[in-house]
Amino acid sequence: MNYVFRLCILGFLLVSSCNNTKNETKTIALHDSKAQFKETKETITFPSKDGLSITADVYVVNNNPVSILLCHQAGYSRGEYKDTAIRLNALGYSVMAIDQRSGNIANQVKNKTNAAAKLKGLPTTYLDAKQDIEAAVDYVYEHNNNKPIVLVGSSYSASLSLLIAAQNDKIKSVAAFSPGEYFKGMHIQELIKTTAKPMFVTASNSETSDLKRLVSKVDRNYLTHYMPKEKGIHGSRALWSSTSGTKGYWDAFETFLRTSN
């Protein structure tokens, strides 16, 4: 079936306190299904823990509240999830992808949070971005009727997501693409070992041994570790259609989302 794109007007569920910069609505017919869904993309801003303006893209499907928060890898932006968000919409999930202050550009989408931080002279290290993810978790939770969410991280933000999820009851499960020991003076393996909620981890084939070690102390009852047979790739680019072995990553990730809710 051919894709059908139709612009229409659709009110958005988030409160008017956000600064909206772009709002698009599409009715999409999937090529592999007779089902159709209405997807709305809106770019918003909200404050981080220190008041810095965070830019985010919100992809809402069929008026469902946002249930998945997407965080990008080093040097990237919310653009890392342009296609991934649409596929998650097709599965029925409304999602939000944020710009953390540590990043730059992905898929021609510039990181506006990083630009705002530099303008204010704020530091933009990986750990400085932790407060951005925490603020985004709070924001989504407050705007989806206080329902715990799925937190997804990529590379350095995967490690931050594991850390935050271990201590935050607003997160019901966490998916980490290529987490690692990226922070000097911190031992992620020890800090996440008592996590008692569903955890999905994966990485490229060459990173698998290190990832096994990272999650070796996590209770197996909570852990899902997908190990690709193909070469794979670092971070959530594993979900990009251009990645060799992406079907395996998607199958495992979709199964986790279904069974951990």
Image (tube, rainbow, N blue to C red):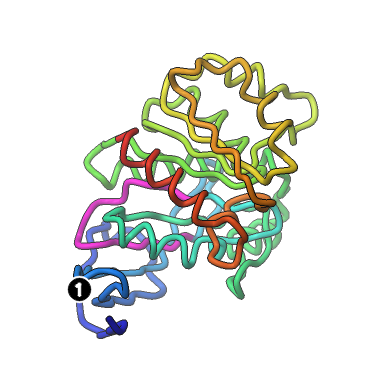
Residue 75, quarter of picture: bottom right
Residue drawn at the location 49% of the way across and 30% of the way down? 224
Say which residue appears at 45% left-offset and 43% top-offset: 252
Q: Which residue is mark 1?
A: 10
Whether 63 is among the magenta residues is yes
Q: Is residue 246 above or below residue 186?
A: below
**Three-letter amino acid code of the residue under disc 1:** Leu
At a point 60% along the width and 44% down the height, the residue shown is: 228
What percent of the width, then of the height, locates residue 106?
62, 67
Residue 237's image quarter? bottom right
Q: Nearer the viewer, residue 260 or 190?
A: 260
Please state which of residues 148 and 189 is positioned toward the viewer in this rendering: 189
Is residue 22 left or right of 30 when viewed as pictured? right
Residue 87, position as x, y percentages in the image: 39, 62
Q: Is residue 106 above or below residue 1?
A: above
Question: Left or right: 52 with respect to 40?
Answer: right
Answer left or right for 182 relative to 94: right
**Which quadrant of the rendered structure holds the N terminus?**
bottom left
231 sits to left or right of 254: right
Element assignment for label 1? loop
Q: Is residue 230 above or below residue 90?
A: above
Mark 1, residues whose alpha carbon is within 10 Å: few (<14), some, or many (≥20)? some
Counting from the top left corner in percent of width and height, residue 232 is at: 65, 52
Q: Is residue 141 shown in magenta?
A: no
Residue at the (55%, 39%) spot, across then down: 176
Query: What residue range appears in magenta?
Result: 56-70
Residue furthest to the front in view is 229
